[in-house]
Amino acid sequence: MQASGRTVRRWAAWWAFGLIVAMAILLSAMGRRFWCECGSWVPWSWDIWTSHNSQHLIDPYFFSHVLHGVLFFFALRLVPRWDSSTRFVIAVLLEVGWEILENSPLIIQRYRESTMAVGYTGDSIANSITDVVACALGFMFATHYSWKASIGLLLATEVLMLVTIRDSLLLNIVMLITPIPAIQQWQTG
Ligand SMILES: [Zn+2]
């Protein structure tokens, strides 16, 4: 254990693994499909304007989930009595909670009404799993590199997503909370 407490211990990784398994079981109980209904086992899907989005392992939104992990790292530092391992488990728990919420009828409906995700029907279970893994990777990135590197990753990812898919973590949050018609038009136009 380093003095700075920047080490994520092995028990925390096991907790993360257990939480992901529990999430997969719960999502399955909620009736979520494990994989894209197209049946193709291609691990990625880069075109977000298709029904394959959020159904395969990796798509552009993988990278916004990496940013979740970076942001959780800094937010959880506000609780000094937790060490890095505890914070890591809490970050994964928060992300698992978000994935379950995101696949609830309430949020799916909200996405369809107020964001660019008009045809959104929720994530596949496989996609939710990689989303949580992405968050864990983001947290580890912020653990190992300086805050400047994290800010750089954050800005680069946001700009790249805006340019390539007209969506980003920030826009996603804004549109989920207060939909702006002009932005929705730009995103779908
Ligand atoms: Zn597909």
Image (spheres, rainbow, N blue to C red):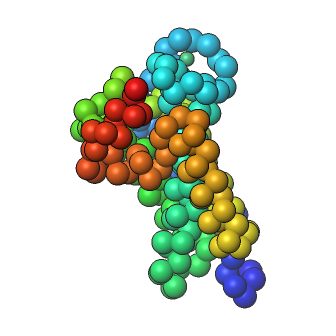
Q: Residue at x 58, y 36 (%)?
A: 164
On the rendering, which quadrant does ligand 1 occupy? top right
Looking at the image, which is closer to me, 145 or 90?
Answer: 145
| Spot occupied by residue 157 in the image (x, y as percentages of width and height) | 61, 50
Question: 52 left or right of 46?
Answer: left
Identify the image quadrant of residue 151. bottom right
Q: Residue at x 53, y 43 (%)?
A: 162
Looking at the image, which is closer to me, 21 or 130?
Answer: 130
| Spot occupied by residue 130 in the image (x, y as percentages of width and height) | 59, 40
Residue furthest to the bottom in view is 3
Q: Residue at x 59, y 78 (%)?
A: 83
Looking at the image, which is closer to me, 182 or 120?
Answer: 182
Question: 114 left or right of 116?
Answer: left
Q: Is residue 26 visible?
A: yes
Quadrant containing the N terminus is: bottom right
Identify the image quadrant of residue 185. top left
